Image (cartoon, coloured by chain):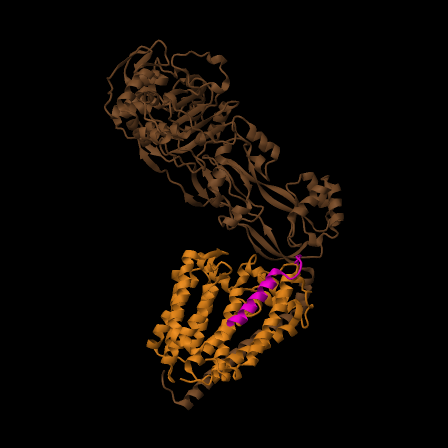
Chain colours: A orange, B brown
Amino acid sequence: MFDRRLIEHFDWGFLAVILLIGSCGLVILYSAVSAGWQGSGLHYLFEKQMIWMGAGMVVILGILVIDFRELDKLNLVIYAVCVGLLVSIYFFGQSGGGSRRWLSLGFANIQPSELMKISLIISLASLYATTVSPEGLNFKNLLKPAVLCAIPVALIVNQPDLGTGLLLLLIAGSITLFVKVEKKVVLTLGAILVCIVPLVWFTGLKEYQKERILTFLDPGRDPLGTGYHIIQSKIAIGSGMITGKGFLQGTQNALSFLPEQHTDFILSVLAEEWGLAGCTVLLVLYFLLLLWGLNIAYNCRNMFGSILAFGITSMVFWQIFINIGMVMGLMPVVGVPLPLVSYGGSSVITNMVGFGILLNISMRKFSTA
Amino acid sequence: MYELNKNADRDWIKQRIMTATLCFLVVFILLFLRLVYLQLIKGEEFRRLSETNCVRLKSIKQSRGLIYDRNKKLLVDNRPAFDLVIVLEDAGPVPDTVSLLSSLIHEPYADLMDNIQKAGNTASYKPVTLKKDISRDQLAVVEAHKFDLPGIHIEIEPTRYYIYPKIASHLLGYLGQVNKKELESGQYPHVKSGDNIGRYGVEKSFEPFLQGRRGGRQVEVDVNGRVVKVLKTVAPVSGNDLYLTLDLSLQQVAEDMLTDKEGAVVAIDPSNGDVLVMASSPAFDQNDFIGGISTEKWRRLMDNPGHPMTNKAIQGEYPPASTYKTLTAIAALEEKAIDRHTTTFCPGYYVFGKRRYHCWSRYGHGKLSVEAAIAQSCDVFFYQAGEKVGVDALAQYARGCGLGRPTGIALAHERAGLIPTASWKRRRFQEAWQAGETLSISIGQGFNLTTPLQMAVFTAAIANGGTLYRPRIVKNIADSNGNVVKKIEPEITGGIPAGKETLDIVKKGLFDVVQGDRGTARGIRIKGIEIAGKTGTAQVFSRKTGEKFDNENLEKKFQDHAWFVCYAPAQNPVIAISVIIEHGEHGSSAAAPVAGAMVKKYLGLPKPKTKKKAPKEG
């Protein structure tokens, strides 16, 4: 089944962009974890991240073997398995930081909510590929996708992991808008939302729940917690100025002023040490990655493939946007990692699965049917 | 798949992709502009801020809720303690600064450095405590040399202060530093390492209310770590205050009477279960636990044979002795084994099987009814009554009266006592119940065990006509402005399984114990106040029947425990008291006077109606 044509069509450029961003990520992570590290050799988090990256490459290879159109047929099975994993968290889940998100596999913990992102994208792409029309989707068309989203979002928000739940909604929303929705549907839904939000706010919420949402939207309300983190992160980023303080020279980083400097707040390490120049390079690389993804969606001659490619690209986009926006104080603080840069196995693997699918689509773009 | 015209299909896709590209571009430009703003326009300012690392968090400690007695008299307060802390980042060179400090405040250099070592690898801008609670003199010296001691700060910490040391120490409890396990348990979400939490007594039971929330400040500091600007402040939230049911002055009387004795006293308001007094002797000084008790003091507490760390009122399990005869009387009357007119002749002993069971009175009480048997505490009468009722029925009544199970007071470590049944003995010892053991049970000896609190609750229930209340120690919980956040209502947990007639008979017997001519506690009579009660003498050392001991010369630890339970005034009771004096010998001589003094204090002598305050006792 692996004919020569596939290898000829392999998208080396896209792989190069991925590897480039991954390498940048490792350099930044090295700096982020090395501050104050007194052990010998490489920091264990750095070593683990390298292993995850390697594992990610293997995952990409594995995904390339299967024709992406198989995913169309299997979409409901994959969806059911992922929802099953989310449900099983309630029984066998590992707690940490006040929520239950992980399942233990013995050698590693997996976060089913991460896999759910990919699975939801596949299911939506499969569904929309049959209902898409030049006029756009009507209410009836949106019913099934709404149910497909609601189940995993409810399960994830309940963990509680508000950030991932929101991300899922944003991705689903992007895909839906991408395949086009009738204008009157968009307007009606918008109007309903505008009516419901104040109603819920003034009658449905308790004082402490309002306070939590306000703090979420405006971290300045919590000057001893997230508000302080944002200030420190802004100081770190700003102090980098144009060229940065130099590799391993970040003082905010070294004095552990930064919260979660190797995961969610890793961009502030880059900004402090490499300045505006370094950040611009990363932004350009990310933009290139996204354009490449859109290009794959455009070139695919298969509706399912196009929507799937767009869905995965939007997933990467939202992570980048939310993470960088959050670190710079533009967005609420939610635990969304920066793709290929933040430390974390689940994030690396999920994104690699996404890239694998994109490469897969790119390779088989001329196949129709 | 939906069939689209091939060309239209391409155009459609192209248009969608272009829109998406545009959206991405706008967002990336936005992010880039934000970077430019932070790194170019505000860059200088942030660079300066980062070089001095000058935006820091300073925590402001909240004050813990206060504790008042029932008359709003303050029992537990907070006082300011001054802690000496160092911020290593600012204190360079650290050894020089610390050695100067050590010579100024006369504390060994090594001890101070030790504390820095212990703090380990914390971030260098976080304050490390060098010495807690320094004296006023040390404070003055440090303040005077402020500018020679960079990085050294004074932090004011509200610290617990028990105004009346040793008074009600078991009830109030004490604090201790939170440990790692507790922090990780997630039980104390707002507690940080180094904080104190309630470890015992009310301080522990009401921890969530007393705790409050810490506040803090975001501040800008100069090169020496001194605050130059306060950026933001979150005010701390004080803990809620507790208003206890305890009566301080009565508690003091009880503890005075317990001085140099081992034992416990509980007083309860029969109308609602309010705990007016809870004393256990010997007591401990709660102030010793603040900032960690010294090993030596702790060892002294642990080595004390009187077990000062045990709250004998709820943890002490004693044979109830003759105070239990009240229960046997209730059971016998209700089971119709006897009635008001049943009489028994007591020759000083009762022959059962092949054994003689002795009455405490060697010469016997002669012919007496149940009322007189209670008043004179005749063993023989109750041997026979108990024998007729049987062990299991007796146990059933005892449980109905709240014995053999915790009363449910809001204090940790309460014991249940023990009410034996035949099946219990089979389970416990794999032995059948002996009929003779029922006789021992009937007079409160043998296997049965009760706590002083249980006996107080039982006595209060007799006094109020049969209602068992959960002993209440906290009436109200209020915020620091005095607004009540929680009211704790009296709670009925059961009722004595007996009719009014039975209770009236028992009450008459108890009345005669003090007020009758031949009552065992007639010695504590107070002119003008009628008391009803029951004495008890619990054998610690099991004597062979008929064997005579010279009690005076018996080693103290083998001497009997003295019980006394009572309520007053007999007709319209407002207080029920239970007293146990370990190794006090006789209830009438060792325990009853304690209750007598308390009744006198609580009710005062008959007073003219115009005067509000009771005249003081000499």
Total residue callouts: 0
Left or right relative to B608: residue A351: right
State the image quarter where residue B508 is shown. top left
Q: Is residue A311 magenta?
A: no
Task: Return the residue nearer the eye: B251 or B101.
Answer: B101
Looking at the picture, tell me which residue is in the foreground, B604 or B12: B12
Please state, as top left, top right, bottom left or bottom right, where the N terminus of chain B lies in the image. bottom left
Residue B35 on image: x %, y %: 61, 72
Q: Is A296 placed left or right of B493 in the picture?
A: right
For residue A318, say whether it is visible: no
Residue occupying image coordinates x 41% and y 36%: B409
Taking the view exactly as shown, the residue that stands out farthest to the top is: B363
Q: Please state the horizontal and vertical placement of residue B334, each as a whole percent of the image.
A: 25, 26
Q: Nearer the viewer, residue B387 or B498?
A: B387
Above or below B198: residue B555:
above
The image quadrant that residue A151 belongs to is bottom left
Q: In the displayed image of the protein, which residue is found farthest to the bottom?
A: B7
Position of residue B108 relative to residue A204, above or below, is: above
Q: Nearer the viewer, residue B395 or B452?
A: B395
**Percent of width and height locating residue A175:** 43, 76
Point out the stretch of residues depicted in magenta. A36-59
| Chief secondary structure of the magenta portion | helix
Q: Position of residue B420 (x, y in %)?
A: 35, 28
